[in-house]
Image (cartoon, grey):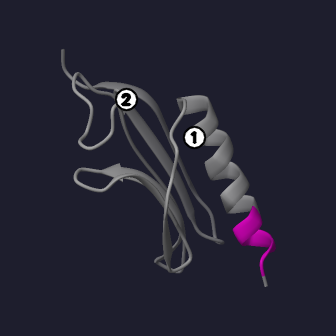
Amino acid sequence: MKAELITRFKNITPEGVIELVVWRVPEPVPPTEHGFKYRAIYAVGGQRVVGFDNERGKGDHCHIGDEERPYVFTSVERLVEDFIAAVEAARRAP
């Protein structure tokens, strides 16, 4: 089985870029145990403000500003909800 694209969304506005891509993969991306590979980013002026991904060797994590935190992946739907909530919070921040 090859990687299967589950969803891809990209929106470029004068404010910034929002992009989310999720694949179903045949083998989990170590050290994760689920069958998805994903990346989500909200960038303003070329700088990442919010990011979620499961980089090989790091596992599920998110970036909020300059801080990197573990992220508990439960489902694609929850990932989308968490990403949108983090972007909305970042937009409201001073």
- Point out residue 85 in the picture as x, y percentages from the top left corner: 72, 53
In the image, what residue occupies the spot 22% across and 26% down? 27
Question: How many other residues sit within 10 Å of disc 2, few (<14), some (14-19) or many (≥20)?
Answer: some
10 shown above or below 6: below
Q: Nearer the viewer, residue 67 or 52?
A: 67
Residue 92's disc number: none
Residue 34's disc number: 2
Q: Earlier in the sequence, mark 1 or mark 2?
A: 2
Which quadrant would the C terminus be assigned to in this image?
Answer: bottom right
41 shown above or below 1: below
48 shown above or below 70: below
Give the amino acid type for the residue marked by disc 1 in the picture.
Leu
Marks counted in the figure total: 2
- Magenta highlight on residue 53: no
- Point out residue 12 in the picture as x, y percentages from the top left corner: 56, 59
Which of the 4 image quadrants contains residue 25? Answer: top left
- Point out residue 88 in the picture as x, y percentages from the top left corner: 75, 60
Which of the 4 image quadrants contains residue 80? Answer: top right
Which quadrant would the N terminus be assigned to in this image?
Answer: top left
- Magenta highlight on residue 92: yes
Farthest residue, direction left: 1
Give the amino acid type for the residue marked by disc 2 in the picture.
His
Q: Mark 1 and mark 2: span between their CA atoms?
A: 13 Å
Kindly report which numbered mark, 1 or 2, lies closer to the viewer in this rendering.
Answer: 2
Please give the range of residues in magenta: 89-93
In the image, what residue occupies the spot 77% across and 77% down? 93
Q: Of helix, strand and loop, which one carries label 1?
A: helix
What residue is pinned by disc 1?
79
- Point out residue 8 in the picture as x, y percentages from the top left corner: 47, 37
In the image, what residue occupies the spot 64% across and 71% down? 14
> Secondary structure of the magenta portion, mostly?
helix
In the image, what residue occupies the spot 52% across and 45% down? 72
